[in-house]
Amino acid sequence: MSEPINIRLLGPGTRVVLEDGAVAEIVSNPLDGVWVFARYLTSPGDPGRVGSEEMIFAQDIVEIGEAG
Amino acid sequence: MVTARKEGYRTGLVNMTAGQISREIFVNDEIYQQELERLFARVWLFVGHESQIPKPGDYFVSGMGEESVLLCRDRANKVHVFLNSCRHRGMKVCRYDEGNTPVFTCPYHGWSYGTDGKLVGVPYFREAYHQQLDKSQWGLIEVPQLCLYKGTVWASWDPAAPPFLEYLGDFVRYLDLTLDGWDGSEGGTEILGGIQKWRIPCNWKFPAENFCGDSYHNISHRSVDLVGIGPSGSGRRDMQERQMARRLQVSFYERGHQTGVYLFPKDQPVPPSYQHSPIVSEYFAHCEAERQRKRGEWGRLIGSPGEIFPNTALHPRQPRTIAVWHPRGTHQTEVWRWYLVDSAAPPEVKDFLRDYYIRYSGPAGMTEQDDMENWNYAHAASRGTIARRHPYSYEQGMGFETENYEWQGLRIPGTVMDITEAKSSEHNLRNLYRRWAEFMEAGSWDELATWRMARAAE
């Protein structure tokens, strides 16, 4: 299990890797420590999500990705 | 122990024929629990002021009865009042006093709500719920009735309650004495500074009845009057109006609202006030003249403490405040006090008033400390087995009320007690408890909105 990530430190533009392998870019952060608003860049398990904006749960974020 | 149901509220505990009220209604836990259901879940309650939430996403955590509520402005600029409790397991979704946010997130399991109350975030929605939870059914619980009136925000949990302005009836004219600009401009007030909050070890009805117009307790403030904290350097307020105005208590029997007012003689200018500051004194002199010009005969009226049933106190003049007596159990009250000033007042005036208001009111205010000490010990001394056997007297001035009161061409709405010569009366206090008893007995608003019956009969 990866180390927990403090998502309160993640600003807009940060890319995050999700548990299912998808990559999303943070659009805004409400700083509640639970959610971020992000846009899907890739989604191997569900390609239809690419481009859509969703709330991402903190425990679904497993890694901070490389900047685009 | 006397129980509410066996005795009946009107005949046993609140005896308006004899002018006596049992101490049980202040100290009995069973009665208190029934109050939460029969009163606080049915009436209109003051929640806050729009100036506290000017931008989309702004919120202010307020209270209705014992319960925490969120007053917020959504992204579409619409004002809402929600129960501050997650639909999943009930945790507060907001634990700050105020702020700005795109979402309210429950820290327990992470359910998240938009500022419009919609459930927008459910952890593991796909995996654990298999996308089968109907989010549209699990938004924050919103009050069924909300009213924005001249900047103030009011709400009721009862969908059957009459609309707020009908709930007020003609009393709205007295509320306006607090909410309109001092120069008579419509709704020209704003909240000054933050909200003062503090707790007092007494039942909420002790402060509520005091602010109905209990002029009898003036002696309690003798020390403050001697110190001279008033804005003209003496007393605790500018009191010159007492020398020339009729001093009235006004009650609305069918609604339960009441207030004191000063009615000035025709064509008589209001005496100078705020003489400790030439700028402030000049400002109010200008406003008084403007108010009389704009409001005509009604401009002869100056407000005095009053109460919108059951727990919103109005203090229209010195200091100008709205207070809410939040029940916090049978034996404790949490006071929240909003201070108001004219939006258009110069900064010097607002600064002067801030200093004066804090000197007078609030947990450290010299006048309010007197009151709190009385309520604290009156409550404690009424809890004992022997004490509870003996009712309080509310007989003062019974039978001297006047309908259709008029003086020098101005008719005053409501049932009036002229206390100019009498000095004091418990007319307004009786009205509070008369209405309280009606609420405790009535099964529905069909029984409470008696004015509708009269209208239908016509």
Image (spheres, grey):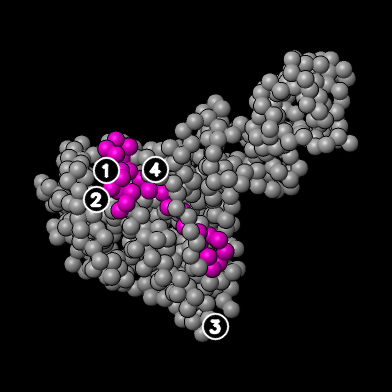
- Please identify, in this view, whether the residue under mark 3 or under mark 4 is nearer the observer: 4
Q: What is the crowding at mark 2: few (fewer than 14 residues within 10 Å), some, or many (at least 20)? A: many
Q: CA distance from mark 3 to mark 1?
A: 51 Å
Q: CA distance from mark 3 to mark 4?
A: 44 Å
| Labelled disc at residue B302 | 2
Q: CA distance from mark 1 to mark 4?
A: 14 Å
Q: Position of residue B281 (x, y in %)?
A: 18, 46
- Left of A50 or right of it: where is B115? left
- Left of B168 or right of it: where is B346? left
In magenta, the rendered stretch is: B327-356
**Quadrant of the rendered image containing residue B287:** top left
**Residues marked 2 and 3 touching at CB (< 8 Å):** no
**Residues marked 3 and 1 touching at CB (< 8 Å):** no
- Please identify, in this view, whether the residue under mark 2 or under mark 4 is nearer the observer: 4
Q: Is residue B348 magenta?
A: yes
> Is residue B323 at all visible to an observer of this figure?
yes
Write down the residue under mark 3.
B385
Looking at the image, is mark 2 or mark 4 earlier in the sequence?
A: 4
Looking at the image, is mark 2 or mark 3 earlier in the sequence?
A: 2
Write down the residue under mark 1.
B349
Write down the residue under mark 4.
B191
The residue nearer to you, when weighing A27 against B152, is A27
Same chain shared by disc 3 and disc 4: yes
Relative to B45, say whether B51 is above or below. Answer: above
